């Protein structure tokens, strides 16, 4: 996966911060924000573990669930022509638009 690192089984997206000259990691799927900085992959793993532990400890202290729950539902806004093309593509595969979109997203997410 591009620009994503796994820290203790939790994914974090990576970006470069030119002002600091460092790589920034930000955990995904948490109920709040937890980020970390380093100049190397090894440093990111070390700092990521520390950041995640501080976040989890704080959540435990406050009695807050640390992980975000996903409902499996979201809205997508498309250009009308793209919407029409997607309906046609789904119908061509004898699928509902929802089934087709879910399959396309699942395939793309596995490849990332």
Image (cartoon, grey):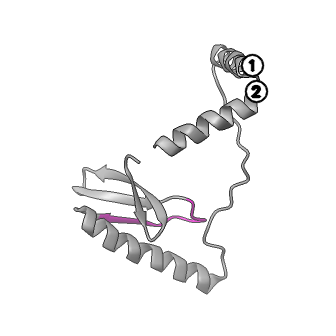
Which residue lies at the image location 75% right of the left edge and 19% below the top edge?
91
- Residue 79 is situated, as x and y percent measured from the top left of the image, at 63, 19
Q: Which residues are magenta?
A: 29-37
Point out which mark residue 95 bears.
2
Dots 1, 2 in contact, CB < 8 A: yes
Q: In which image quadrant can residue 61 be found?
A: bottom right
Q: Dot 1: within a 10 Å radius of its alpha carbon, few (fewer than 14), some, or many (20 or more) residues? A: few
The secondary structure type at the circle numbered 2 is: loop
The secondary structure type at the circle numbered 1 is: helix
Left or right of 91: which side holds 82? Answer: left
Q: Say if the magenta span includes residue 32.
A: yes
Q: Which residue is mark 1?
A: 91
- Residue 98 is situated, as x and y percent measured from the top left of the image, at 74, 33
Which residue lies at the image location 60% right of the left edge and 72% below the top edge?
66
Image vertical order of residue 35 relative to residue 14, above or below: below
Q: Say if the magenta span includes residue 16.
A: no
| Screen quadrant of the C terminus | top left
Which residue lies at the image location 70% right of the left edge and 42% below the top edge?
74
| Residue 32 vs residue 42, the one in the foreground | 42
Main secondary structure along the magenta-highlighted residues: loop
């Amino acid at each position: 996966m591009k620009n994503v690192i796994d820290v203790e089984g939790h994914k974090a997206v990576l970006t470069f911060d030119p002002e600091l000259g460092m790589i920034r990691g930000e955990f995904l799927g948490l109920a709040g924000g937890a980020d970390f900085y380093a100049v190397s992959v090894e440093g990111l793993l070390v700092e990521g573990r520390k950041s995640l532990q501080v976040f989890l400890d704080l959540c435990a202290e406050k009695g807050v669930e640390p992980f975000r729950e996903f409902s499996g539902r979201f809205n997508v806004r498309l250009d009308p022509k793209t919407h029409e093309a997607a309906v046609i593509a789904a119908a061509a595969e004898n699928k509902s638009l929802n089934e087709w979109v879910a399959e396309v997203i699942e395939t793309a997410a596995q490849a990332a």
